[in-house]
Amino acid sequence: MMTNSSAAAVQTIPNDLEPYWMPFTANRAFKKAPRLVTRAKDMHYFTADGRKVLDGSAGLWCTNAGHNRDPIVKAIQQQAAELDYASAFQFSHPKAFELASRIAALAPGDLDHVFFANSGSEAVDTALKVALAYFNIHGQGSRTRLIGRERGYHGVGFGGISVGGIVSNRKFFGALLAGVDHLPNTYNREQQAFSRGEPEWGAHLADDLERIVALHDASTIAAVIVEPMAGSTGVLASPKGYLKRLREICDKYGILLIFDEVITGFGRLGYAFAAERYGVIPDMITFAKGVTSGSVPMGGVVVRKGLYDAFMQGPEHAIEFFHGYTYSAHPLACAAGLATLDLYREEDLFARARKLESKWYDAALSLKGLPNVLDIRMVGLTCGIDLASRPDAVGRRGFDAMTRAFHEQDMMMRSVGDTLALSPPLIVTEAQIDEIFGKVAAIIRAVA
């Protein structure tokens, strides 16, 4: 006889996995051994058969306040019943302005204006378009060149993959945007291995921007975009002094500086934005993920007052910036964002993340010396663990570790090639930190 719980489990398992073409996933391998979750709460996912799975990756770097937090759920439910949608073109709703004000208040310096999008990818493309349009407004239309960084990840729009530096994300899609160049990546294992926080070595790598300026001339360069911590390529922290040096060079040549904080924003590095951690004010900050704790898609760009003011010219009835999305500042996303920011403030989660850093670092470094561990990088509540590749199958050890974590250790984590990436919700406890790294240790031994 089928019990109520087993009947519910059957109802939640799809009978055909084939139609869904999954993103950034080995589809054939997944569909042979699916990793399905059916609900979540706080630090855990739950499977249809009732297994409790510890979330070691905050979903996809995004559920910073934890899963299904009651205030966020309530805010979304109430908003859906009150106002489901409002046009963002020539109309709006009060919560859009309230959320923009709250985000601007969290941003440092004169980063005072917020343009809403729906994802990190859209946020990046928005920032790049702001930069190009800004110089056109100022009669410097020759400034069309965009500078990214090797091993950078800026989403999957054509702008984002053009300035990004991940080979697999770029090689299938043709020439991409013209005139893009790249800074060298900031990682050097020989000089930086097993650093606690920001590496001491590497600030000088910012000086390569001088070479790029000399090659192309500053009059052709619009903006530089970097992540304060490159997460999707394996947790690469900016070296000490690197971002300040980039700011100085950009100021010297009148180049805009964009921080992609889609991952680092909203507490991941212990502050509302990593710009505050590093004492550097960029011209724009992109955000997404943590702004709603992953509950409703939302992204955006915070821009400095001078950039916004440059667009506010001409007739008042005329559109100043021909850009936007159907779902910009969606009412449900704004309601979720406001409730999420309330949770961050009420539970002081950014400061809590800072306090947990030392514990997190100690636990991460306990893995040093395990089989095939080449390096461990950590900054804020993030960690990247490089495992030696198998000679006949690069990426297989990391893939096996990720799948074993889910099926054998009841834990979710990211794998990027043969790098394991961890970034738990900011509500993680010290005991759960020990649990996470205890499970990771068992996994590393299992895939030796």
Image (spheres, rainbow, N blue to C red):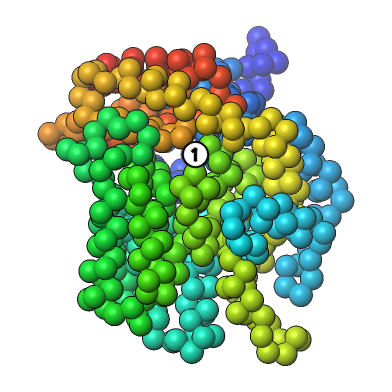
Residue 392, x across and y down, in percent: 13, 35
Image position of 112 (left or right of 205) = right
Can you name the residue that lies furthest to the top here? Answer: 1
Based on the displayed image, in which of its 4 quarters is residue 346 positioned?
Answer: top right
Q: In this view, does 163 lie to the left or right of 100?
A: left
**Residue at the image point whose x is 49% and y is 73% from the top:** 131
Q: Does 367 sit above or below residue 60?
A: above
Q: Is mark 1 on a helix, strand or loop?
A: loop
In the rendered image, the quadrant that contains the C terminus is top left
Question: To which residue does mark 1 refer?
Answer: 269
Is residue 194 positioned above or below 188 on the image?
above
Count of picture labels: 1
Outermost residue on the right side: it is 82
**Residue 267 % position (x, y):** 56, 39
Identify which residue is drawn at 48% across, 81% down.
135
Viewport quadrant of the N terminus: top right
